[in-house]
Amino acid sequence: MSATLFWIAIGFALWLLGLHGLLTLRHALRRIIAINLMGSGVFLVMIALAARHDPSDPLLVALVVTGLVVAVSATALALRLSSALATSKEHER
Amino acid sequence: MSWHAFLPMAIVLSSLLPGLVIFGLREDQQRLRVTLNLLGVTLKLLLVGSMLYGVSQGSEYRFSVPLLPGVPLVLQADALALLFVALSSLLWALTTVYAIGYLEDSPLRSRFFGYFSLCVSATVGLALAGNLVSFLLFYELLTLATFPLVVHRGTPESLRAGRVYLAYTVGGGTLVLMGVALLHSLAGTPDFQAAGYLLEQVDEHDMALRVAFALLILGLGVKAALIPLHGWLPQAMVAPAPVSALLHAVAVVKAGAFGIVRVVYDVFGAEALMQLDLTKPLLWLAAGTILYGSLRALQQRELKKRLAYSTISQVSYVTLGVALLGPIAAVGGLVHLVHQGLMKVTLFYCAGNFAETLGIHRIREMDGVGRRMPWTMTAFSIGALGMIGIPPIAGFISKWTLGLGALEVGQDWVLLVLLGSALLNATALSPLGWSQLIVEREFAI
Amino acid sequence: MNAALVSLLLPLAGALLLILLRPARSGRWVIALSLGALVAAIMALQVVLDHGERNLLVGGWEAGLAIRFRLTPLAALLLVFTAGLHLLVALYTARIAHAAGKEDYWALSCLLHAALAALWLSADLFNLYVTLELLSLVAVALVSLAGRKAWKPALNYLLLSLAGSLAYLLGVALIYGRYGVLDLALLAQLTEADGVTHLALLLMTLGLMLKAALWPLHLWLPPAHAAAPTAVSALLSALVVKGPLYILWLIWSEIAPVEFGRDAGLLFGTAGVLALLAGGWSALRAPRLKTLVAYSTVAQLGYALLALGLLLLLHLNEPRLHAALWLFVLAHGLAKVSMFLAAGELQSILGSKRVTGMRGASQNVPIALAAFAVAGGSLVGLPPSGGFLAKWLLLQPLFERPQHWPWAVGVLLGTLMSAAYVFRVVAHGFDRARPNPPSIRPDRLAQWLALLPALLVWGLALISEPLLLWLGGLGR
């Protein structure tokens, strides 16, 4: 199988793993990691598609960078929320 | 906009606007409220009178604004509209005066009269409605305006009755909406026409037309209390007497019956219905309701409940007249619409008086009341006799005409129904006239 | 186009300035900003009606590479809609401070407005992704303003929302990999019915359905909307879920190949009817008032789904169904704002969050109850409200084709369900036997502000002619 298809399959697998984790895990931090795994899966697919050309498709690279920025911001928000939740749970005990 | 275009809408507004103002009044602003009420009443009577005069001189009145694509909101003054509008306005005037007295010192009168006015505006609106969608609009508004009146007392029984009322009427309204939308997809929604506008569609779309007719009649039949859709009516007796009077004589029940008249004559038309074979089921339903209502009335011990079942029976006379499809029968049905309104209003006023003054709710308790409240009892007796159909009281004329109409179209069995019902009514209502006059009794009030 | 950009940039700039400067009376500034945005949006609507669709290629790059902003009549109308609702909610929140939760509400609501404006104007798949993410993050932040009890639903909302975005993004990546363009107009000519496109569309659809809380992917919505502060709930139900819905509609009406239409249409239609029934049933059984209103949103979105499904089943040949879909959106937005604001008023004045706590509201808090009832009337579809107009336009194409009549049964049942849960609340309001006395003094102006959107939605059918014109050139 071609390299592109291989990496796209890996990307898909990561995405599915992340989704599975999100839906089955209970712990907030693990779910956040699962989401990041999904994100990485999508980015891998995009990079695999970008790598089909030589030099790599700049549009896709730009999309990946944008996606990374969004992922970082979202993760930051998620971490803040989950830590606030954890702290408040501790206070309740 | 010319006066001829605006007058129908003015008639609706003459009770709507005072009603909205009354909502804002405080409880203690008694005089202002009564003034507004009476002002609205007088204004409406004047406007209706001027419309009647204008039509007799040959004028045409039509109000039209765009509402939906291809369907304007139309209010116009044809013969049926004038009949119902005049009846409603007159009965509203009487009921308003009655209610002002009945509810003296009752709580939340501003709210009551506000909704009361909305109710009448909706009734007048649907009387004047010139096409099915306009009719539907006011029909649904009527449901909404009457609910707060049914639950006015705020007790658990009122709320229960109110929920039942809503379940039936909103369900019925939705069925009517479906029927109207279906008809629109077939033939558009033109103004009501004298012999209906669906005749051309019969060959192509007979299935769809039958479904539409069923939807419409079922939906309208809820308000018109056709069996088996009548369940809300006896429950709604928990409302104060002016509400019962209004609901049973003027607004809700008549709106349903009026709607059936419109659908049969001005939408489908006699010819189309005969080709579609739809009148037989309607006829049977009407006849069944007449007998059922009269029978159940006999079983009731409470006065208002007995009057309620009597209404169920009586309003179906109108449906019967319409379903017979002959011109004489139609006249009989329509005349009965008016007469039943007047008589039922009288009976409910009296029932309300009995309840308020002497605490009478059951028929047994009425023994000897003729001595304590002779005027009320006389009125009651006249109303009762009219219900039974004794000449020369109004009820007799309409029943006679209905009988003639039945003979005219060859449905002789209907005569038996009419006779049977008259006998049942006599049994149900005459004890109410007799013992009350003769028996002496102490009243614990 | 400039007016539309002003409508986008005003709230954006305003948000940034509010965060940086933190002025004392943020509320007044936001009211002024949203008013300005509204005026600009109305001007944009005027322009697009006179001169037709406008495009803007950001940065001067050529098509295919540049980010394209597109102004259609629908987009302009949605800009007006967003600015209008933002203004209405801002007016209410300026009066009732606790409806917002915290002061941060003001800046965040402006960001929300900007994100939505950018979404309506976007015309390529990736830009839509970016605006979608911005929208979601701001929405989550807004939900968490309610304090501790809202954090758990907010986190859940965030995680599921991100999952949806990532599904959408994967779909976008596949589309780009297959066709090499992201622009909607270019894609419309290129798409074919092959396996990759099918997978991509599936992924995008699932992601968007999750974000728009379309049945059966709606479970995150009721807790989040119920826990959020009142003003936030109003904005969420009325506006935020409509963004993903817009993208879903764009994808299926502009770029999806016709061959997929039948299956997709059937799925959407079924999901729509089930949303109506399941959402309505849950609303009927919800013990808390705001949960009831949140489930009502799930149910009402079923109408939009049904319209979309029918649109696809009829091969996009029915302009009336486009109009019906967007009328549902508009009418629902106005009605929901009114409903949530009224619910907030009722809850705070009567001191109870439960539906049964609304006893006696008709005498103690009459205007708020009236707002709830009038708004509910549009949701039920009583004439002449906007909801009725939308339902009418949905039913007409249905009835013209006898093979589609079963869908009408779904609409019938949905109507009855909506009536049931609306009247459930209203009936409690009329319970005078043991009324719930007011805990605080009712504020009349606030209640009138809650009533205002409901009155507007009832007047919608009266302006049906111009409205249908704006929704895509549907004349009489």
Image (spheres, rainbow, N blue to C red):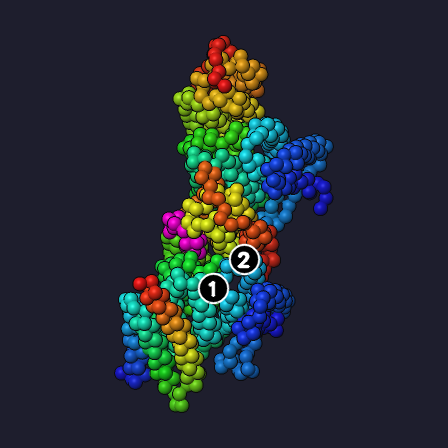
What amino acid does circle 1 point to?
Val
Tell me where residue C31 appears, x and y as whole percent.
Answer: 59, 64
- In this view of the protein, can residue C414 be seen by the observer? no
Q: Is residue C204 above or below residue B421?
A: below
Q: Earlier in the sequence, mark 2 or mark 1?
A: 2
- Residue name at image x 52 percent, y 44 percent: C364
Dot 1 falls on a residue whose secondary structure is helix
Label 2 and label 1: CA atoms lie apart by 22 Å
In the rendering, which numbered label is found on residue C96? 2
What amino acid does circle 2 point to?
Ile
Q: Is residue C250 above or below residue A39?
A: above
Q: Is residue B428 above or below residue A29?
A: above
Tell me where residue B99 appears, x and y as whole percent.
Answer: 58, 29
- Residue name at image x 43 percent, y 34 percent: B157
User: In which image quadrant can residue A45 be found?
Assistant: bottom left
Q: Mark 1 highlights which residue?
A: C240
Q: For this view, does B401 lie left or right of residue C274?
A: right
The residue closer to the viewer here, A92 or C186, is A92
- Residue name at image x 55 percent, y 82 percent: C59
The residue mark sitting in front, 2 or 1, is: 2
The residue closer to the viewer here, C259 or B272, is C259
Q: Which residues are magenta?
A: C281-297
Dot 2 falls on a residue whose secondary structure is loop
Instruction: Count neighbours of disc 1 (C-alpha within 10 A) and say few if under 14, some if 14 to 19, many if 20 or more.
Output: many
- Residue name at image x 57 percent, y 27 percent: B102
Residue B330 within the magenta-colored segment of the rendering: no
- The chain carrying label 2 is C
Tell me where residue B127 appears, x and y as whole percent.
Answer: 59, 36
- In this view of the protein, can residue C32 be seen by the observer? yes
Q: Main secondary structure of the magenta part?
A: helix
